[in-house]
Amino acid sequence: MAALLEVANVSKNFSGLRAVADVTFAVPEGAIFAVIGPNGAGKTTLFNLIAGVFAPDAGEIAFNGVRIDGQPPDEICRRGIGRTFQIVRPFPGLSVEENVTIGALLRQPDPAAAMRRAHEILWRLDLFDKRRHLAGALTLPDRKRLEVARALATEPKLLLLDEVMAGLRPTETDRMVDILKMLNKESGLTILLIEHVMRAVMSVATRVLVLHHGAAIAEGTPDAVVRDPAVVASYLGAEAV
Amino acid sequence: MIARLLHGVPRHALLLLAGLLAILVAAPIFADDYLVTVLILILYFAYTGQAWNILMGFAGQLSLGHALFVGLGAYTSAALYVHFGIGPWIGMPVAILISVACGAIIGFLAFRFGVGGVYFAILTIAFCEFTRIGFDHFDWVAGSSGLFLPVANYTRNDLINLRGQPVMFYYVILALTVAAFVMCHALLRSRVGYYWQAIREDEAAARSLGISTFRYKMIAIVISSGMTAPAGVFYAFYYNNLFPEQTFFILRSIEIILGPIIGGVGTLFGPVIGAFLLTGLSEALQELLTAYGLDTPGAKRVFYGVCLLVVVMVLPNGIWPPIARLLRLDRRETPET
């Protein structure tokens, strides 16, 4: 499988603090790739480098063989990378269907067609019945699925999910895992997820990268990674032993 | 085109609109001269409020200097008329162009360099203020001594040169207001309208969906400033005199935004309802006080203040949203919790 996303020797400093240090990895097309690590490991910074929020201080990021590092977030999206936010950011004063329609307008400039596309996506994510609800009035699990729906509406080749399971109850987490697996299987969507919830990562990811203090310390299948002594020591700690 | 505009609009909303329009069209038959001038004022604020609402209500960029675009429209058309005898309908496109150019400069400076929120508001005030000071010393338009349009006692209405009686001005501003309403309705349902609302709600999230926020904010200020200019043309030919101290005065900008704020920022009906309520009721109040022989020159301002206070406290989203829910015109639902 060809790599859809290639991150090569990427670093980012915030006034002396090394948030991401020389990280290299590749996400193959069709994979569900997870980035895990303790708090402050640099996961969200890495995510924001890929999504175009920050430009890396060093290194290169390539998508589909084209360099994208330093491009603004809207350009990154137009190239085919959709994202969600760790702290959900729906458009609160708009309805669920309007939220998703705005995403769909990127590829469907006609609002009526974009709305139809939005409805299809809302069906798949179990939000169709709530399509007229104000996004700001939804519960957290619904808002998390709305974020995924809105990002999907931009028809990405790669979907970046930032802690999309955080704050969900186990049953809701399972539901999200099922949705991600379905999307991956049915449309071949490549997913890069940053996650804290190990249970979700173990059941959904095909490959895992572990960050610690901004550096990649292990990469492999979920089973291999959790047995890696360096990972156990730095991240899972006493809890896992 | 029309079918597209009407698509999805509830039938009872159309009936309501048709009824309101019929009343407004027929109003001069029943109304005396005074009432017609009040209605002109109401429609003028409904129009300017609608134009301001595009920038603030739709795209979320607070302008506190919209008097600038009114003033530029007014001075451009008046100067062309006074100096070259060019009529207002030819002056209007020129006025729009100048207004748009100025709006684009403000927009570029602000949006290119990420100036938003109160800082954007201050920038708009600054532009309006230095234009006021500049025009005070701009001899071609008579500076601080004021630019006057020739006035005569008109017995006939000359629509070409906008010279005539209040009733003619009434229909002109009614036509402008209806056109603005229809245009805003169309904009709100277009891709641009959706993108503006996304930017208003959350700019970072909007960018993550591939929206070039700079581009769409520029479109908003260009349309809003261009749409405000005709109100200035109307103002110049209706009042026949222009003073920089009055035209570009910050209070003029505030008057423009009070209607939409009280009616409902970001809604189509907000500017209209707000204008009717504020201007209509404050004029009625003034009449009432005069009838009782009370001389209270500041009553209007106090009334504006009280209205604003009540709305901010009781209906922070304005008067229109609850009415829309009552009339079942709002497609968005807040689920019971």
Image (spheres, grey):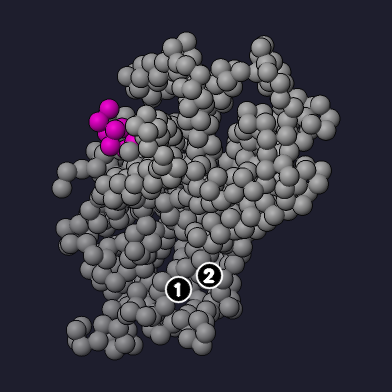
Q: Main secondary structure of the magenta part?
A: helix
Question: At 47% from the left edge and 80% from the top edge, which residue is drawn?
Answer: A20
- Comparing A139 with B137, the one in front is B137
Callout 1 crowding tier (Cα within 10 Å): few <14, some 14–19, many ≥20: many
Question: Both on one chain, marks 2 and 1?
Answer: yes
Q: Position of residue B151 (x, y in %)?
A: 71, 25
Q: Position of residue A54 (x, y in %)?
A: 53, 70
Residue drawn at (28%, 50%) of the image: B313
Left or right: where does residue B292 sit relative to residue B170?
left
**Spatial separation of the CA atoms under disc 2 and disc 1:** 8 Å
Marks 2/1 in contact by CB < 8 Å: the verdict is: yes
Query: Disc 1 residue type?
Result: Thr
The quarter of the image holding the C terminus of chain A is: bottom left
Question: Quick one: SS at disc 2?
Answer: loop
Q: Which mark, by number, is residue A45?
A: 1
Say which amino acid is labelled 2: Phe
The boundaries of the magenta stretch are B320-327
Label 2: how many residues lie within 10 Å, few (<14), some (14-19) or many (20+)?
A: some
- Examine the rendered structure and indicate whether residue B31 appears above or below residue B123: above
The image shows residue B150, relative to residue A227, as above or below, that is above
Q: What number is the disc on residue A54?
A: 2
Residue A201 at x, y percent in the picture? 29, 67
